[in-house]
Image (cartoon, grey):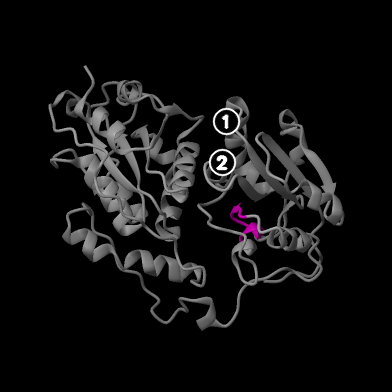
Amino acid sequence: MISALGKSITAYADRIYAVPGYPVTTLIEETGAELCINEKVALECALGDSLSGKRACVIVKHVGMNVLADPLAHATAQGLTAGVVIVVGDDPTAFGTQTVQDSRIYGSIAVCPVIGMERPDPVGDAFAASEKWSRVVILRFVPEDLKKPGNVHANGSERNTGKLADPDLTMYGRAFRAYESVPAMTDAGFVPFPISPLTGENVSKSRSERGSSRMFCPGCPFQGVFDLLEEKKIRVICDTGCSLLSMIPPYTSGIANYGMGSSLGVAATSTGVALTGDYALLHSGILTLIDLHAKGRPLLCIVLQNRCMGTTGRQPVPEILDYIGFTNPVVCDAGEQEKISGLLVPDNKLQVLVIQGACPEERCL
């Protein structure tokens, strides 16, 4: 017998991703969710669906929340479009797991709504809240909840549209915008833990107000890549690092960023083009690359290889080509503009384009 929760998830969600384990395995089987290599990848794919206008659900066990915490927190500041709901199964008595963890605390960490199964329509309420406040919503259940009868609501419910953060906002400005919704979420009963207000009221909240933005270091070899993306009107999901410059005027090719190593998963279900650095890819993006390769999913992944952590002090990065040979990457020098231009063509297959260049000695801080 399919649980009421399983029926509601399939009724409301356009796409469902999951990582199995107690107590969510049965629910995953009921919903026919797509299995992902880990929970972070699952949430990144869901966020890409959101940017494409599709409601997405991610089903994980409690300890899986620890793995997806980074894009979860970034989503609050970045915003989203269609609703994204994490359905998390907690195991309070450690019946089938080694760890007891109350996942509701992530509502405080990520400043996002958290609801339980006591509502008449928990899944519908979760998606509505996600779209109202433009962030991921956590829906928590415990094993006993899967045995309880409940109402199943149709997918014909009214859909609203969330929104991404204003590109002119500074990093602090995005966080400040996200925190503005806390009183309303608290009044609506979506915040089970106290969330402290932000300090720093005198900090600039927009780039135009501040009058400056971080730009390319003098002599950056990769600026031509950004120019080509802009010229070709290629929309990309960017990664944490220098890839973020694709979202800063005069560039508009970058759509969104959901944290380190996130661009591949988000792009795979949205724009189809990811812009990342060699460190971000090795840090955690490579797991998505493995997942996409195994599933035969299309993506154009553009890797800017400078062999260092360019924004944190130029710490060395291992040679990435030693680890991504399974993708048959195409390698070229950042100065080969004509060659790069011809390769910036998304296709119906997984393509990895590694563009090599060295960071200049003079840095732009």
- Position of the C terminus, as image quadrant, is bottom right
Of residues 93 and 6, the one nearer the viewer is: 6
Q: Is residue 151 left or right of residue 254?
A: left
What is the quadrant of residue 63 in the picture? top left
In percent of width and height, residue 228 lies at 74, 59
Q: Is residue 297 left or right of residue 7?
A: right
In percent of width and height, residue 299 lies at 63, 39
In percent of width and height, residue 39 lies at 45, 35
| Residue 237 shown in magenta | yes
Amino acid type, callout 1: Asp
Amino acid type, callout 2: Ala
| Residue 191 shown in magenta | no
Image mark for residue 268: 2
Q: Is residue 113 visible?
A: no
Image mark for residue 342: none
Query: Would you call the spot at circle 1 few (<14 residues within 10 Å), some (14-19), or many (20 or more)?
Result: some
Of residues 227 and 214, the one nearer the viewer is: 227
x 47%, y 79%: residue: 204
- As helix, strand or loop, the secondary structure at mark 1 comes to helix
What is the quadrant of residue 102 in the picture? top left
| Range shown magenta | 235-244
In percent of width and height, residue 119 lies at 14, 42
Q: Which of marks 1 and 2 precedes in the sequence?
A: 2
x 74%, y 69%: residue: 217
The answer to whether residue 346 is above or below residue 290 is below
Reading the image, the residue beneath label 1 is: 291
Q: Is residue 354 left or right of residue 208?
A: right
Mark 2 or 1, which is nearer the eye? 2
Query: Would you call the spot at circle 2 few (<14 residues within 10 Å), some (14-19), or many (20 or more)?
Result: many
